Amino acid sequence: MSLTIYDTLHREKRVFQPRDPRRVTLYVCGPTVYDYAHIGNARPPVVFDVLTRLLRRTYGAAKVVYARNVTDVDDKINQKAAREGTPIGDVTSRYEAAYLEDMSRLNVSPPDLAPHVTDHIDAIVAQIGAIMDQGCAYAAEGHVLFDVSSYQNYGRLSGRNLDDMIMGARVEVAPYKKNPHDFVLWKPSKEGEPSWPSPWGEGRPGWHIECSAMIEETLGLPIDIHGGGIDLVFPHHENEIAQGVCAHGHAHAPDAHAEYSRYWMHNGFLTVDAEKMSKSVGNVLLLHDLVQAIPGEVVRWALLSAHYRQPLDWNQSLLDQSRKALDRLYGALHRAADVEASDDQPPADFLKSIEDDLNTPGAMATLFALSSEIERAMTAGDAASVARAKGQLKAAADLLGVLQAEPATWFDAGVDDVFRTEVEGLLEQRAAARAGKDWPEADRIRDRLNALKVVVMDGPTGATWRVKA
């Protein structure tokens, strides 16, 4: 089966065909490093990490180039530094390091390229100049603004009509703008803010032009896939296309979008307990805090448990279900620890799901089927079937970025030898009581295990256990 992905621009699933199979390019909008990322920020890197793993399997690791940018110049960064009384560089380096650490805990592989805005100012200035040369931007009062009326396909990605946008605008329009939706490519810097020289005066780039310039300089145009959250479709990605297309004189070409990115992918919104995350509501969950208290794989599984294009509601039930799912899979591997895996390829059912627009729920169902196959084969003493299913399970899990720990380590996390000895002794007593149908004794042992906050998972070949999170 060929990989199909839902293309936001065409509003349908399309068979993926890279421009050059020898160099498949993917760009995903990365973090603005002024604070810790919240859980919603974690969904895109996890989703597109799965896509990158799949592309590398299909085309070869050396033939896929994945770029995820770092925005290190921004109003929020400036404000954070001013509040703390610290240099801007200290703020950006601190939160970029925290972001990368948190991504590592989620088993998100590092991108091949991580362009920083401040390293690409020359490319940004050059692209702005090219857009102006094409008559698609204008300078006014130290600013350079993109003229949206100059690009006939503006609004196509988001499905918005330019005339309607202009007529329905309810924003305060700066006097130097030709129309309300013209957006900033370059702006003057305030005192104390980062500033660079340009033909239009000292200043810094607008947000949208950063990605356009970095994509062209690091990957070249057109790229194969551009990804990000659904909230970026408008205005960020809409503006990216306009800039990237118009810089090369394609403002009036009917298929100009294809000159920038061949496919557009966007993940759905994440809510918390059925509410939008908001500081005013007080329900913003920081990823940095979550991965200190919860295994990163649990967070990753939860983020992949719904199809990436669908909304995802983050709640305690989701985390509990994710932990139980991983316990079940690790339990099967733990019980088959002495059997050497004999297959290193994901099964066909798994690939059919994951190649169908990253259908992770369908792919997860195959993992459960394989774990059940391991348990049945262990009970039957069928070592060959155990070895085959175990290898397939690990190969499939690698594409999802889960089951990366040793099973014993997964269950023993945070447990010392004294505690382990006590629990395993209780489990032996429990097994004996149940075998002898001494139910009062079995209940007593169960109560003791509950008091120790131990979760027991019975399987056909025995029990595994872990400490409640």
Image (cartoon, grey):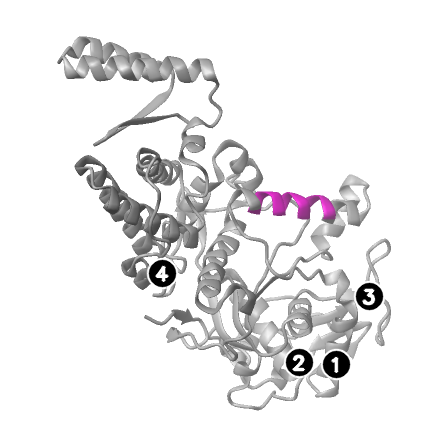
Question: In the image, what residue type sits under mark 3?
Answer: Gly
Does the segment drawn in magenta span residue 102? yes
- Asked whether disc 2 touches disc 1, contact meaning CB atoms under 8 Å apart, the reply is yes
Does the segment drawn in magenta span residue 467? no
Q: How far apart are labels 4 and 1 at the CA level?
A: 46 Å
Q: Where is residue 107 in the image (x, y as percent from the top left)?
A: 51, 47
- The label nearer to you, 2 versus 4, is 4
Residue pointed to by mark 3: 203
Q: Determine the residue positioned at 49% across, 59% down.
A: 48
Residue pointed to by mark 2: 147
Residue 176 in sight in this render: no
When the figure is inspected, residue 374 is found, relative to residue 128, above or below; the finding is above
- Give whichever of discs 4 and 1 has the lower sequence position: 1
Predominant secondary structure in magenta? Answer: helix
Tag 3, which secondary structure?
loop
Q: Tell me the magenta residue range.
A: 93-103
